[in-house]
Image (cartoon, rainbow, N blue to C red):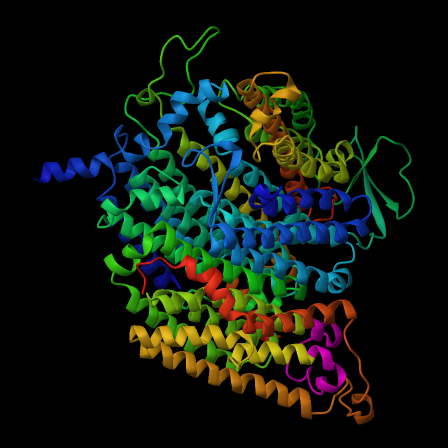
Amino acid sequence: MKVVGLIIALLAGSLLVYATADFPPLGDPNSPASVHVSPRYIEKTMEETDVPNIVTSVLADYRGYDTMFETTVIFCAGVACFLLLRVYRREEPQERLYRHVLTGVTIHVKAGKLPPSPDFERIDSAWTPHDLIIKTICRLLIPFIQLFALYVIAHGHHSPGGGFQGGVMLGASVIVLAMSQDLRTAVRRLREKADALMCATGVFIYAGTGALCLLLGSNFLDYSALAPVLHVDPIMARSHGIFMVEVGVGVAVMGVMIWIYNNVSSMGKYDEGL
Amino acid sequence: MMGEFMQAVIAKYNYWIYITLMMIGLYAMIAKNNLIKKIVGMNIFQTAIILFYVSIGVKKGGTLPIVEHGHGAHAHAVHAADYLNPLPHVLMLTAIVVSVATLGVALALGVKVYREYQTLEEDEILARIREK
Amino acid sequence: MSAHYPTLLVTVPLLSAFVISAAGWVNKRWCFPIAVAALGVSAYSCVGLLLKVADGGVVHYRLGGWPPPWGIAYYVDQLNALVLCVVSLAALINLIAAKKSIEREFPEKTAPFYTLYVLFVTGMLGITVTGDAFNLYVLLEIGSLTGYGLIAMGDKARAPLSTLNYLYMGTIGACFYLLGVGYLYIVTGSLNMADIAHLLPPLYHSKAVLTAFIICLVGVWVKMAFFPLHGWLPNAYTFAPSAASSLIAPLMTKVMIYVMIRLILTVFTPQFAFGTLLVSKPIVWLAVAAIVMGALLALKERDVKRMLTYIIIAEVGYMVGGAWLGNRAGMTGAILHIANDALMTLCVFLAVGCIVYKTKGARFEDIQGLFRKMPFTMAGFVVGALSIIGVPPTCGFFSKWYLISGAIQAGQYGFMVALLFSSLVSVVLFFRIFEIAYYEPFQDHHGETHTHHASLMDEAPLGMVVPLLIVAAGLVVMGLYTGGIVSHVIRFVIPKGLV
């Protein structure tokens, strides 16, 4: 297999090297890619969409249809991970392990009984480390991560950022909680059902915005059709339409990141996780 | 002659980097025995293509594709040559998301395989299948 | 609303997927009707679009209202419209037929299964309808990811590993396609298929365009399991749950062949593919190898489902070879065979689904005496098998006829011989199955022979058999209307330059 792999890799590599002869050098301002389609995006973005960040305007408007399916791709991944891994019925162990949060003492409790006081948290293996510093720092960090994520989503029109980046940060804030404490704590904050509904809602906001344009008599995803509803001119309507879909993307990405993490890290059992 | 050739090679260094990375990824995907190493190879392969695309967008003398603006703007005309080509960035945002999604599904499948065979070495799994 | 058919046929299933996913958490019973309704609307739009295109020519649609090449545009001609109809109808029929087996195999996970099912169909329809090379890549990944999810739910021990191998190969294929699109973008600066075709002629002799063509082609070949890149297919399709294999086996490979034909006809233009490049002959020989190897490997198998997966590999060889013959008859045969093969694969896989539903397996010992036990299922299977063999009046005969006459016109006698050889092998394959299913008595699991049991009819549920019989009837109808399809639809697809 090693020889086969080497031969295929070298063949592919030499084919690509051969083609490079006809490529423009790095940074050539007169290359076809720089002069054919893209100048319009750069020169007309303010006029046509009122969004200074050209990447955002191309992403969510000129090629917004691609981005809708891009969001759908991660939704597919979330659903696929859930379908593949989630286990509903599992045999409960004879006795559960509980640890006292303050002292770290671990006790065994027979199945079906509750621990003596609410200060105990459930763990799955006796060696689960307990680290006060990590837990505290992560808890302090989470609100700031989330605040910054909201800024990144909202400010995607004017600076690098947007729904994907902000959504990943929002997802990461919950994943940090799951990693520093355990998965049960994180799932208590954001239930599985709420998370799954969030994924579907996020992508639905995107596709629904497109369908709304269709219902208002324009082509799919032609945000200028929203102008009469939003009481702005058609160009501002495009800018607002982009914001709407960015919010949808943010919600969907956050939900899917958490969903995938929960399923993969606990092998679908939703126990204490990593 | 030699100097010209070297200059041509250096002017296109971005392509050499991406081709090398792509070959590493492709080799790992075909030749490695461990399923997770194959997934890592897959990610290197996808990242190489992302590098390739992003390097298409570079323009000498261009800046970030965010139009300078202020209130009461449109005072100065925007020239395409002053900004990087935004299209490859947009395309690669899509490709990054696709590679993350593929990674997620691949890991889920890896977990499923591990749950069944308690190993991720392909030859061991195949040997176990043949035993049955 | 008819102006919006091109977008409705993709976005209605897409929106319904999110509704299904959410409904699954409220009441699982809502998922199936929503999925059927969405695919029904989609199929209605596809048929409406086909009639519109056959009537008034090519339909354009601008998504977001942006003109191409700046925005993404749909470009629907007779070729897309035909494939769209086949894909949407096959998906709808299979969904109805698969309800029972999905509910039995995944009682707790019907909602995510239906979600992925509908998204897979969205991906396939989107690939077919789009006129943008990059948009095609994104939809290809939707189709692939959902496909991995659906296939891996099959056989508990073997499906995940074979799906993982499929995922590696599929990712290589999709990445190659993406890289090829990047090469086209770097030399033309455009992603719109029609615009690329417009910009390419001065670049026909460029090394970059040649490489782009090779990489795209190899990428698509991996995805369609063209010999020798077929390694992932047999295991993935054999261990998939029957609801998924009867969805993915007819659609995925056929849609990828559509993509290849679209690349030849629209993106790179036939002048480049058949004129500038001199690769037609080697590719046809590769197709010959695919057909012969597929047929021979199928002979070896003792499991109906696995045997059918090798027949798919041979059929892929038919279509690739036909498209690369480089003449009118060959291309007509290849396009016609996309539609016919999708339906006949659907037919035989639905029949196998019925058999697996009743006997828990489709190995040769499981199908003994099935003609008496499941006469309607076997009747459907026989029609599908006859069509694969190429017996008139089933549709398989007519596309094979076009392929053979194309081969003779092009002087590719090797391809003609391979077609006849594989038909002969199919005769052996299927009559062996008929013999086992007809003559040998039904044996139950204790190994004792119960002759009196064998006379009892134990047919699969009505919801599975009726769709199967509809598809089987469709095979005959398609065969009878071949002339109409060719003269009203396919004739307009083939460029004038091709004789």
Please name the residue shown 53% across and 81% down the image.
Answer: C392
Disc tally is 0
Q: Which residues are magenta?
A: C352-377
* Residue C308 percent across, percent down from the top left: 56, 74
The answer to whether C172 is drawn above or below residue B67 in the figure is below
Residue B31 visible, this orientation: no
Q: Judge by depth and name the residue closer to the eye, A192 or C73.
A: C73
* Residue C13 percent across, percent down from the top left: 65, 47
Picture quadrant where residue A202 is located: top right
Picture quadrant where residue C453 is located: bottom right
Quadrant where the N terminus of chain C lies? top right
Q: Judge by depth and name the residue closer to the eye, A131 or C36.
A: C36
Q: Judge by depth and name the residue closer to the eye, A182 or C476.
A: C476
Please name the residue shown 61% across and 85% down the image.
Answer: C433
Please name the residue shown 55% across and 68% down the image.
Answer: C235
* Residue B84 percent across, percent down from the top left: 36, 25
Task: Specify the farthest residue to the front.
Answer: C55
The answer to whether B113 is drawn above or below residue C398 in the figure is above
As drawn, is C386 to the left or to the right of C269? right
Residue C312 visible, this orientation: yes
Task: Specify the farthest residue to the top.
Answer: B72
Quadrant where the C terminus of chain C lies? bottom left
* Residue C147 percent across, percent down from the top left: 58, 56
As drawn, is C87 to the left or to the right of A29? right
Residue C457 included in the magenta stretch of the image: no
The answer to whether C314 is drawn above or below residue A240 in the figure is below
As drawn, is A129 to the left or to the right of A91? left
Residue C353 included in the magenta stretch of the image: yes
